[in-house]
Amino acid sequence: MEISQTKDFELVAKLNKPVHDLHFTLYPKYFKQYDYKKIKEEFKKLINNEKFIFLILQVNQEAVGYAWIEIRDYPENAFKKSYQSIYIHQISMIQTQRKKGYGTALMNYIYNLANEKGIDLIELDYWADNNIAKEFYKKQDFVKYREFVYKQL
């Protein structure tokens, strides 16, 4: 198993399919069906943003998953002190490669990256009905510290 940073937006777009399909299944009102060409163009725009880091996990030289993370800077203001975090936008793993410890390996890589950069906070969010994410992050010892709510009108 190998984890490395990548700028290969085409590969990231392909690996995005499992997580995107899950989001579309759970929330078709908000998510479009997966369209490789359109997703690829979005990642092409995002991949060179210096705040974003894309990680690829390979097993036997085959890419089976990825993580999209961001280094976030929160400036000081009258209300808050300044701080940094690593924000996890997405983690996606090919269906047949789940439950093999690869997600945990990606998370450990992210934790080590945070330590190297002197960042002590990892943030993320997931959709309420995404039980796969909920259980995975619970195993990773994530705790809820804010809640995001809405009212549909």
Image: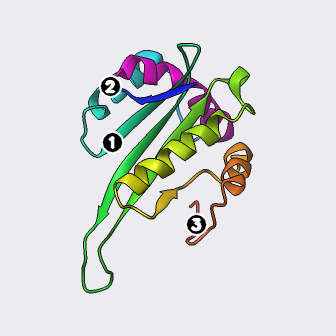
State yes or no: residue 69 in magenta.
no
Question: Any mark on residue 85, and which?
Answer: none
Quadrant of the frame with the N terminus: top right
Q: Name the colour scheme.
A: rainbow
- What residue did someone put label 3 on? 149
Judge whether residue 131 can be spotted in this image: yes
Q: Is residue 43 left or right of residue 152?
A: left
Instruction: Determine which of the numbered discs, if any, sits on residue 52 in the image.
Output: 1
Q: Are marks 1 and 2 in contact (CB under 8 Å)?
A: no
> Viewed as shown, does residue 30 lie left or right of 130?
left
Q: Which residues are magenta?
A: 7-26
| Residue under label 2 | 7
Q: Position of residue 78 (x, y in %)?
A: 25, 86
Point out the tag, 3 or 2, that comes first from the N-terminus: 2
Task: Please name the amino acid that badge 1 sits on.
Answer: Phe
Would you say the residues marked 3 and 1 are in contact, meaning their CB atoms lie under 8 Å apart?
no
- Helix, strand or loop at mark 1: strand
